[in-house]
Image: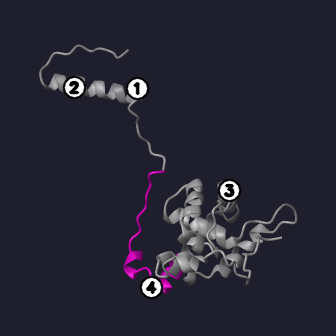
Amino acid sequence: MGPKPADERADHDLFRSELLNLINQRHELVRLAALIDWQAFEAEWSPEFVSTTGRPALPTRLMAALLYLKHVYALSDEDVCEGWRENPYWQHFSGERYFQHELPCDPSSLVRWRQRIGEAGCEWLLAHSIEAARKGGVIKRQSLEHVVLDTTVQPKAIAHPTDSRLLNRAREQLVEAAQDAGIGVSSFSVQ
């Protein structure tokens, strides 16, 4: 059993407006959603979610859209789920027909999906999204010439202000500066 298929019922709910009637058709997410080959995601990722026990996985398009939105807007799993609940463009992008008032999934589901598709799957998602945007003329060729990397999450070899070695080094520099200025300083230790 693979992921749940998207709900594609032909019947209309007379008392609810479809998202297409509520949103601007020229919005970048609406245009991008039309350009992305969502069936390619289903074909690529379905083998990762075959199971004979338990409930079926969440729809592939929903999870691919949530992962894309998470990375584009630099959000946590919790924030992307909350944002999805409030944003009709995000809901349309993920394949919803009508506006939903509840969370699309538990945020921990995104963790499990990322673990199953792996780093290669996330890169594949990004590559497909960029290719769709390029085909649609949403991104300019110049935008792909430069890559901006944010390394703030990389561990760095830095000394923190509470580090005693940093305090001792500051004391040594202060003693050297005082001696250079001709001020007699007797050596003292920090306790």
Of the residues tagged 1 and 4, which is closer to the observer? 4
**Disc 2, disc 4: CB below 8 Å?**
no
Q: Which mark is residue 164?
A: 1
Residue 69 horizontal/vertical position (percent): 54, 66
**What's the CA distance linking mark 3 and mark 1?**
44 Å
Disc 4 to disc 3, C-alpha distance: 34 Å
**Residue identified by numbered label 3:** 106
Judged from this view, the residue extending furthest toward the left is 182
Which residue lies under the disc numbered 2? 176
Q: Nearer the viewer, residue 190 or 76?
A: 76
Q: Nearer the viewer, mark 3 or mark 1?
A: 3
Instruction: Say whether residue 149 is magenta.
Output: yes
Which residue is the site of mark 4?
137
Q: Is any atom of residue 166 visible in this view?
A: yes
**Mark 3 crowdedness (10 Å alpha carbons): few <14, some 14-19, many ≥20:** few
Instruction: Give the crowd class for mark 2: few <14, some 14-19, many >=20 residues within 10 Å.
Output: some
Span shown in magenta: 130-153
C-alpha separation, residue under disc 2 versus residue under disc 3: 59 Å
Secondary structure beneath disc 1? Answer: helix
* Mark 2 / mark 3, whichever is N-terminal: 3
